[in-house]
Image (cartoon, grey):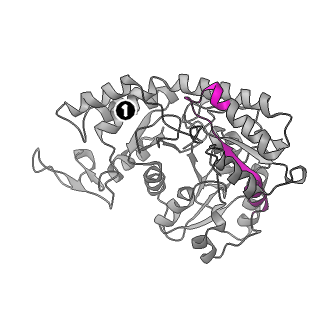
Amino acid sequence: MNSFIPYGRQDISPQDIDAVVEVLRSDWITQGPAIPRFEQAVAEYCGVKYAVAVTSATAALHIACLAADLGSGDILWTSPNTFVASANCGLYCGAEVDFVDIDRRTYNLSIEELECKLERSNQIEKLPKIVIPVHFSGQSCQMDRIADLAQKYGFQVIEDASHAIGASYQEKPVGSCQFSDMTVFSFHPVKIITTGEGGMVLTNREDLYEKLIRLRTHGITRNPNFMTEESHGGWYYQQLELGFNYRMTDIQAALGASQMQRLDEFVTRRRFLAKRYDELLQDLPLTLPWQHPDTESSWHLYVIRLKLDKICKTHRQVFEELRQAGIGVNLHYIPVHTQPYYQELGFKWEDFPQSEQYYREAISIPLYAGLTLEEQDRVVRALREVIA
């Protein structure tokens, strides 16, 4: 019987294991030297000044919003085509959340929809304080145009690049924060690199960096420059704001730093496999991923859309038959505004038609660095058999 091929999975090398074991044998397994090493490796790779490692990308989004002073009475906008964390982070801060529909080709936040919504919202004085563009599947949004709109309308930009470490936009690494205030990465096991669980916030602004490092540690500082009175001694610290225990461990950071050494290798392999899918699937009744010429995706996901008018099966039938054939397909994402929690906030089906149409047709097929050509061929054969 054929083994199950997941849609994504981690790639752990002997060097990764050695790096973790080295930490376990050291004096530091929680807050030690591995964390700044990992942060420096990511910051240098992305060409950004500051990086703050945390327990997850959800935590990263939360403290990024807090660092940007998002709170009650404020508004956050993001894409409906994302995991719920991209929107929940605004609710955690007591803000109102709204969405901007997606582009029909990239499945990223639509610049045209964003511009129209900003114009309408400006007339009724309900502009967002923060916009979170989501780099879906590893392809960057059109960040230069978003930055122009941010300057015009006065909102801050937090890039949700959970899918996109190793990607580039206009020949610069995603994470450089050239067009944003902050960028967030995820290191979940199905992402490009992993720390088991983990996330990171990147920024070029020192004021944001200082707030981020406090917020991940209960709002506490040991820096006398920020204290309200003279230090009582070497043991002294002050809590300046309400923060959280969002600290990554040295164990996780050691794995992340080791994985960073193979980031380019992982991305190169994913790009090769994505191009091969393009070639092998081009004759099937599918819409294949489209890439904007300004972007180089890191290919976290390879999403096909079914041309259902040319297939004698439903979306659900295709999905379930692929699963039955041992192909671990998934669906990214159920539009956030259709979740019961968000429906209770007033959102409803038909609010964002492009996201909803995408949801009715999309299937994520297996793509990860360790996927063999034989396994990829098996995925393609299964697709051909199911939709024939």
Q: Is residue 75 left or right of residue 241?
A: right
Number of labels in the image equals: 1
Q: Residues within 10 Å of mark 1 (few under 14, many from 20)?
A: many
Q: Position of residue 129 (x, y in %)?
A: 58, 59
Which quadrant of the structure image shows residue 161?
top right
Q: Position of residue 213 (x, y in %)?
A: 35, 46
Q: Identify the residue at the far right of this view.
A: 310
Of residue 160 and residue 107, the one placed in the foreground of this image is 107
Instruction: Return the residue found at the far left.
Output: 233
The three-letter code of the residue at mark 1 reads: Leu
Q: Residue at x 70, y 58 (%)?
A: 100
Residue at position x 55%, y 29% in the image:
370
Q: Which residue is mark 1?
A: 255
Q: Position of residue 158 (x, y in %)?
A: 55, 48
Q: Which residues are magenta?
A: 352-376
Quadrant, the N terminus = top right
